[in-house]
Image (cartoon, helix red, strand yellow):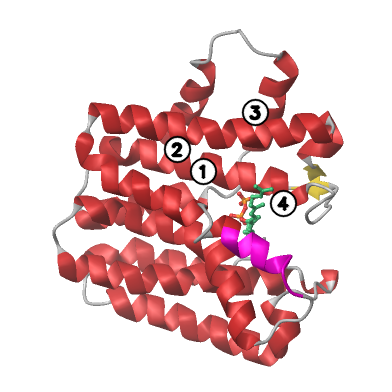
């Protein structure tokens, strides 16, 4: 992952100086110090499993991590979740003001597509992967999921599962499956699809359990209770691991599913 951090740093440094310094600082503040970098890790593990070289998928990993960090900035804004803290530090809008945070999120999102377009121009085989990332980040994926949250006052099991699949699961799916568009191993691709769907929802369920004290009402935990949430989390982890269990080369993906299920932050 150190190589990924270097590439991320290089992308930001490649900007010329013709922009307001505060905007650039707000963008950097959202990206460093790093979060867990789960999504790029998934891109690289999935690619390794499929035998796709690291360098080829770096733009996919960069774009997904930039989109993830923009979504966190926007998610923390007063009009969304109104969170004052992120990763133990003041959230971007608390540090830089609402307008600059909003723009920093927009700029990270735009940068993600700049990277994808450049990559596709250099290597046209990446076009389906890039297009899939855009779909998963958009109205049918993450943004659609976020909009669901603001569309209903009460949630049943179906609706809250949809929300988890889209708001959180879609970008995780983009990370696991965007490399699959570069592979013709259909058996492995199908197994990765099951893995991606399962860990995507499981990630949100574990997030709910970590944030149990926040008493969030639009959550799987609130709708279904702790016992069912823990049951589903373990079931999804088993489904994810079983999907890949016949391949020795899937060991790291399998271990990652376990560690995401048991994570504490
Ligand atoms: C266009 C206004 C506007 C919004 C964009 C905000 C948004 C759409 C979507 C929000 C999606 C969102 C924040 C989902 C939560 C997913 C989640 C559990 C995030 C935490 O991920 P981690 O734990 O974060 O991987 P780190 O800090 O490790 O990077």
For the residues labelled 4 and 2, the Cα–Cα distance comes to 20 Å
Residue 75's disc is 4
Q: Which residue is rendered at x = 21% and y = 35% of the image?
A: 124
- Residue 62 marker: 2
Q: Sequence order check: which comes first, mark 4 or mark 1?
A: 1
Q: Which callout, 1 or 3, points at the residue further toward the start of the chain?
A: 3
Q: Which quarter is ligand 1 in?
A: bottom right
Which quadrant of the figure contains the C terminus?
A: bottom right
Image location of residue 128, percent across then percent down: 28, 48
Q: Which residues are magenta?
A: 144-152
Q: Quadrant of residue 95?
A: top right
In the image, is residue 74 part of the stretch drawn in magenta? no
Position of residue 231 in the picture relative to residue 197 (left or right) = right
Callout 3–callout 2 Cβ contact below 8 Å: no
Quarter of the view holding residue 196: bottom left
SS under mark 1: helix
Whether pointer 2 and pointer 1 mark residues with C-beta atoms closer than 8 Å, the reply is: yes
On the image, which quarter does residue 261 sit in? bottom right
The answer to whether residue 18 of the structure is visible from this angle is: yes
* CB within 8 Å, label 4 to label 1: no
Instruction: Kindly identify which residue carries mark 3.
Output: 28
Q: Give the mark toward the camera: 4 or 1.
A: 4
The secondary structure type at the circle numbered 4 is: helix
**Residue 73, position in %: x, y?**
70, 43
Residue under the point 31% across and 67% down: 192
Read off the residue under disc 1: 65
Magenta span: chief secondary structure: helix
Residue at point 35%, 47% (across, down) = 131
Q: Is residue 61 above or below residue 38?
A: above
């Amino acid at each position: 992952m150190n190589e990924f951090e270097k590439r991320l740093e290089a992308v930001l440094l490649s900007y010329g100086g013709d922009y307001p310094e505060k905007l650039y600082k707000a963008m950097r503040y959202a990206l460093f110090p790093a979060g867990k970098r789960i999504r790029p890790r998934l891109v690289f593990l999935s690619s390794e499993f499929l035998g796709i070289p690291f360098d080829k998928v770096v733009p996919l990993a960069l774009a997904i991590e930039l989109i993830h960090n923009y979504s966190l900035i926007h998610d923390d804004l007063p009009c969304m979740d109104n969170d004052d803290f992120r990763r133990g530090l003041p959230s971007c809008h608390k540090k830089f003001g609402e307008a600059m945070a909003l723009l920093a999120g927009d700029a990270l999102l735009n940068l993600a597509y700049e990277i994808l377009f450049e990559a596709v121009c250099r290597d046209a085989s990446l076009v389906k992967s890039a297009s899939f990332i855009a779909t998963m980040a958009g109205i049918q994926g993450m943004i659609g999921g976020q909009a669901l949250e603001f569309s209903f006052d009460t949630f049943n099991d179906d609706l809250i599962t949809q929300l988890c699949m889209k708001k959180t699961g879609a970008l995780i799916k983009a990370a696991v499956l965007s490399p699959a568009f570069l592979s013709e191993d259909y058996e492995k691709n199908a197994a990765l699809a099951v893995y991606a769907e399962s860990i995507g929802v499981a990630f949100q369920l574990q997030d709910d359990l970590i944030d149990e004290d926040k008493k969030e009402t639009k959550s799987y935990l609130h709708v279904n209770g702790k016992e069912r949430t823990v049951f589903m989390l373990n079931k999804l982890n088993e489904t994810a691991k079983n999907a890949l269990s016949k391949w020795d080369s899937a060991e790291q993906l399998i271990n990652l599913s376990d560690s995401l299920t048991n994570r504490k932050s």
